[in-house]
Amino acid sequence: MKKKIFSVVLSMSVLFMIVSTSAFAAKPKQVSITAYGVGSQAYIFSAGIAEAVNKVAGIKTNVIPAGTDVGRVLPMRGGEVEFTILTGATGWFVSHGTGDFAGPEWGPQPIRMAWRGGDLFVGVYTRGDSGIKKISDMKGKRVAVVPGAATLTHNVLGPLAFGGLYLEKGDFRAVQFPSHGAAAKAVTEGAADIYQFGTTGSAPMETAASLHGIHWFDLDPKDEKGWERLWAFCPWGAKALVTRYAGKEKGHPSFHAMVYPYNIWCWDNTPVDTVYEYAKAMWDGYDIYKNVHAELPGWNHETLADTTGCFYPYHAGVVKLMKEKGVWTAKHEQFQQTQLDNEKKRMALWKVAQSEAKQKKIALDSPEWGKFWWDKLIAAGLLK
């Protein structure tokens, strides 16, 4: 009898330890997230969300600013941080192994959406008194570019291709600037004729407020061939009608441009409980963080379930939350499986492409390799 009692007590003790350990592991006390620099939208987003998550769940968030995309992603890949906040365009480069992530040490990465955030509307613009009304009018003009910043460069080359203009054909002049801000400032000051920016960003706001005013270029959604040319450079961009933008207060009409999301990301092997608890705290803390920044109201429950402009899977922890909240549908299941399948195909293609490149004596750290890999993705139907 004593042996039976001892056995029962021992079993209950072990069960209690397992349950206690699981409960402890389920909710992290602290997480870390890399973000763009202090003062940037992403940093403000992260800080506002961090405050809400701490209030509703007691999870502290260490927000770490980093100056480059690689600097934001590398700590996450190495397991030093749980999350990063990036635009959907940068997430696309990471998941497809292109741009800054085309080197032999990178390639397609198993990045996951830990939260699908608000939409980022990106348009191309010039000064209002430049006399340039259509993109086709840009022939021979000066285009601001930022060397080494793949997303920024593609976001301006894509819309120009929409208008049938290409740098390699000499249709316009590329003028180099050291940063995103410097390129935008160049348009305001007349050192460049066109650039791209978030439509509510501070730089186009300054252009709109100047004596010159601002003119946004409309990307006609009915021009399918134009959009196909754009997508060859910017496959992450979806069509969108822009209703909030610099210069609107002066009566400028709405226009069409690209849209893609700002997301919180994690790696595929980030613990399910960690991602689930953080996403749940964001869900519950929305009313706290939504007023921290004018764009944060867009980081709501509806946008979490919106797959527009997304070419990467949700993390299993977010899937768990969405199923609990009743917002995971058959369409989400289909989307998820498609993204997981495409990820496997890209990773397999990467190995084949590397082997072919070596046979062709293409250095895997060269610009030629970047183009070779991009063309491989196009040929395989995996650019999107």
Image: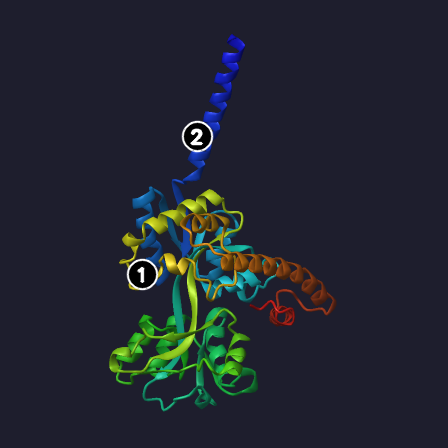
Q: Is residue 44 above or below residue 52?
A: below
Q: Is residue 107 above or below residue 135?
A: above
State the residue position of label 1: 297
Check the picture and name the quadrant holding the C terminus: bottom right
Element on which disc 1 rests = helix
Nearest to N terminus: mark 1 or mark 2: 2
Element on which disc 2 rests = helix
Count of picture labels: 2
Say which amino acid is labelled 1.
Pro
Specify few, some or many for label 2: CA neighbours under 10 Å numbering under 14, 14-19, or 20 or more: few
Q: Position of residue 351 (x, y in %)?
A: 68, 60
Q: Position of residue 68 (x, y in %)?
A: 45, 61
Colouring mode (rainbow / by chain / secondary structure / one colour): rainbow
Residue 321 is at least partly visible in this image: yes
Q: Residue furthest top?
A: 1
Give the residue displayed 59% in from the left and 62% down from the top: 103
Give the residue displayed 46% in from the left and 42% down from the top: 273
- The front one of 151 and 344 is 344
| Left-right relation of 305 to 355 | left
Q: Residue furthest right?
A: 359
When asked about the image quadrant of residue 129, the answer is bottom left
- The front one of 168 and 309 is 309
Residue 107 is at least partly visible in this image: no
Specify few, some or many for label 1: CA neighbours under 10 Å numbering under 14, 14-19, or 20 or more: some
State the residue position of label 2: 20
Say which amino acid is labelled 2.
Ser
Give the residue displayed 45% in from the left and 47% down from the top: 275
